[in-house]
Image (tube, rainbow, N blue to C red):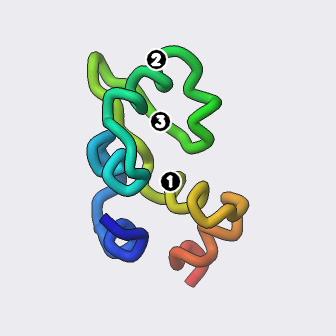
Amino acid sequence: MTLKEIEDMTCNTLTVKQVAEFLGKDPQVIRDQAEREPKYLGFPICKAGHSYCIPRIGFITWVKGLTPIVAYAQTGGWT
């Protein structure tokens, strides 16, 4: 999975599997870190029951090293 593919998605959230594929990591490593200390992942992650999801725009913001307000503007938030 590429950043362009993630940017072109219309969904609001990504799965741990999608993010792991992009990062070249095992999905369980991301789940384990999210359980122990999610702040060290660097990107936002949400837990619902036993499942995790990652806000797509938040993840893109983290990958690009942007501040949230710049990412919002670049995604058409102020058109």
SS under mark 1:
helix
The relative height of residue 58 versus residue 2 in the rendered view (above or below) is above
The relative height of residue 49 versus residue 19 in the rendered view (above or below) is above
The percent coordinates of residue 41 (x first, y second) are 57, 36
Q: Residue at x 56, y 44 (%)?
A: 43
For discs 2 and 3, the disc positioned in front in the rendered view: 2
The one nearer the camera, 62 or 12, is: 62
SS under mark 3:
loop
* Residue 67 shown left or right of residue 50 in the figure: right
* Residue 76 shown left or right of residue 18 in the figure: right
Q: Residues within 10 Å of mark 1 (few under 14, many from 20)?
A: many
* Residue 12 shown left or right of residue 38 in the figure: left
The one nearer the camera, 20 or 49, is: 20
Q: CA distance from mark 2 to mark 3?
A: 10 Å
Residue under numbered circle 3: 45
Kind of residue at badge 3 = Ile
The relative height of residue 65 versus residue 16 in the rendered view (above or below) is below
Residues under numbered marks 2 and 1 in contact, where contact means CB atoms less than 8 Å apart: no
Which label belongs to residue 59?
A: 1
The percent coordinates of residue 34 (x first, y second) are 48, 25
Kind of residue at badge 2 = Glu
Which label belongs to residue 35?
A: 2
Q: Earlier in the sequence, mark 2 or mark 3?
A: 2
The relative height of residue 43 versus residue 49 in the rendered view (above or below) is below
Q: CA distance from mark 2 to mark 1?
A: 18 Å
